[in-house]
Amino acid sequence: MIVYTGGTFDLFHSGHSRLLERCKNIAGVGGQVVVSVNPSEFCAQYKEPPICELFERMEVVSSCKWVDKVIINTGGADSKPAILEAKADVIVVGSDWETKDYHKQMGFTQEWLDEHNIKVIFVPYSEHISTTIIKSRILDRMFQ
Ligand code: CTP
């Protein structure tokens, strides 16, 4: 099974590695985890630009033992090109997206997913760690 997951993966942290481990477990024996990383210009459109450049974030994600392949989310708000490039069977995302309109955020519809026989699986979000939390820890340390 090919598992697709996407994100910015800036300042790679344990929430990211746990998500990727869950992806690998879902992919199963002989399965693959393909990670689609957002270009910096795209991130800057909806939140602040990442600290690390796209190539730096891709290099770190590639080094994670749960990851088989890293691609660029070339479609930006439309994740369909990257999902098709990955040949995904399953899309995995953290449960922080469960209460939001994930389909709209990703630029696909349930019909499109059904047509391509792709399932979406939400996995537990890791509390108390995120890129935003790391940035505020650094700021707190600098100004304490
Ligand atoms: N994720 C997670 N647990 C966390 C942080 C992220 O499971 N503590 C998951 C998200 O649900 C998403 C993926 O990791 O599927 C990539 O998230 P990303 O936005 O790159 O990381 P965040 O740390 O959430 O970034 P930010 O604080 O800027 O929102």
Image (cartoon, rainbow, N blue to C red):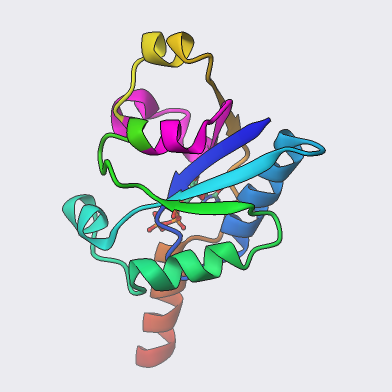
Looking at the picture, does residue 111 appear above or below residue 42?
above
> Which is more toward the observer, 54 or 125?
54
**Camera sees residue 44:** yes
Where on the picture, by quarter, is residue 26?
Answer: top right
Give how far across and how far down residue 131 sits, in percent. 44, 64
**Residue that extends furthest to the right in the rendered view of this protein:** 29
Task: Let me know if residue 86 is in the magenta part.
Answer: yes
Q: Is residue 143 left or right of residue 3?
A: left
The C terminus is located in which quarter? bottom left
Looking at the picture, does residue 143 appear above or below residue 22?
below
The residue under the point 64% across, 52% down is 68
- All told, the count of numbered labels is 0
Q: Is residue 103 left or right of residue 118?
A: left
The residue under the point 35% across, 30% down is 80
What span is in magenta?
82-106
> Which is more toward the observer, 141 or 112?
112
The residue under the point 42% across, 50% down is 7
Task: Let me know if residue 41 is in the magenta part.
Answer: no
The residue under the point 23% across, 53% down is 42
**Residue that extends furthest to the left in the rendered view of this protein:** 45
Where on the picture, by quarter, is residue 47?
Answer: bottom left
Give how far across and how far down residue 130 sits, in percent. 49, 60
Q: Is residue 13 left or right of residue 111?
A: right
**Camera sees residue 144:** no
The N terminus is located in which quarter? top right
